[in-house]
Amino acid sequence: MGILNKIIKSVVYHCTEKPEHYVHVDEPKTMQERRQVQYNNWCKAKGVYNGSYLPKNPNLLMSSGKKGWVEITSCKDGTSNHRIFRRKSSGQIVDYNGKALTNRNTIADEHYHWRTASTIKGNRKISNAIKYRDRYGNTCSKGSKESHLAPLDKKYIFK
């Protein structure tokens, strides 16, 4: 049975495109989704952070070597609670929001937002209508439950 699994994995690997991002897949149905699962498992094993698989400590994003991330947070921000990162290899953009008081005087858990790539050019926003992606890679609206990604794919209850 082990050799058959190796053959199936090899066929999936060679007949599909390499994914650019970690995108959560609940149950793979297509060959491309199976390739996504292979890529996701590789990301976790190697500690390659991308897509919806992101570390609790955002400093780890930049310590991943050549395929790591670049911080593009605006100098004007000044707080360490909100940081913006761009992935070098794919241009993917994520916002990190650390623990902070919300307008309801409750402490919000740290979380990420995965932006669509067209919302930032260089270090500045080019669109006021920033779109986000959920952990499955689908676009979702700003402020929605789906746009809040927990570090390392943990369940996150948006308050």
Image (tube, rainbow, N blue to C red):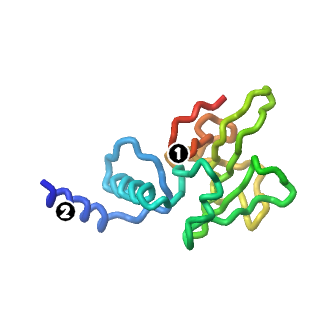
Closest to the observer, 92 or 49: 49
Please tell me whether mark 1 sits on a helix, a strand or a loop: loop
Q: Position of residue 143 (x, y in %)?
A: 69, 37
Q: Position of residue 155 (x, y in %)?
A: 52, 35
Answer whether residue 98 is visible to the viewer in this image. Answer: yes
Residue sitting at x 15%, y 56%: 2
Q: Position of residue 146 (x, y in %)?
A: 58, 38
The answer to which image quadrant residue 67 occupies is bottom right
Q: Dot 2 surroundings within 10 Å: few (below 14), some, or many (20 or more)? A: few
The answer to which image quadrant residue 94 occupies is bottom right
Residue sitting at x 49%, y 46%: 136
Judging by the rendered image, the residue that carries numbered circle 1 is 135
Residue sitting at x 75%, y 28%: 106
Judging by the rendered image, the residue that carries numbered circle 2 is 7
Residue type at numbered disc 1: Arg
Left or right of 12? Residue 155 is right
Q: Dot 1 surroundings within 10 Å: few (below 14), some, or many (20 or more)? A: many
Q: Counting residues from the N terminus, which is met first, the one under dot 2 or under dot 1?
A: 2
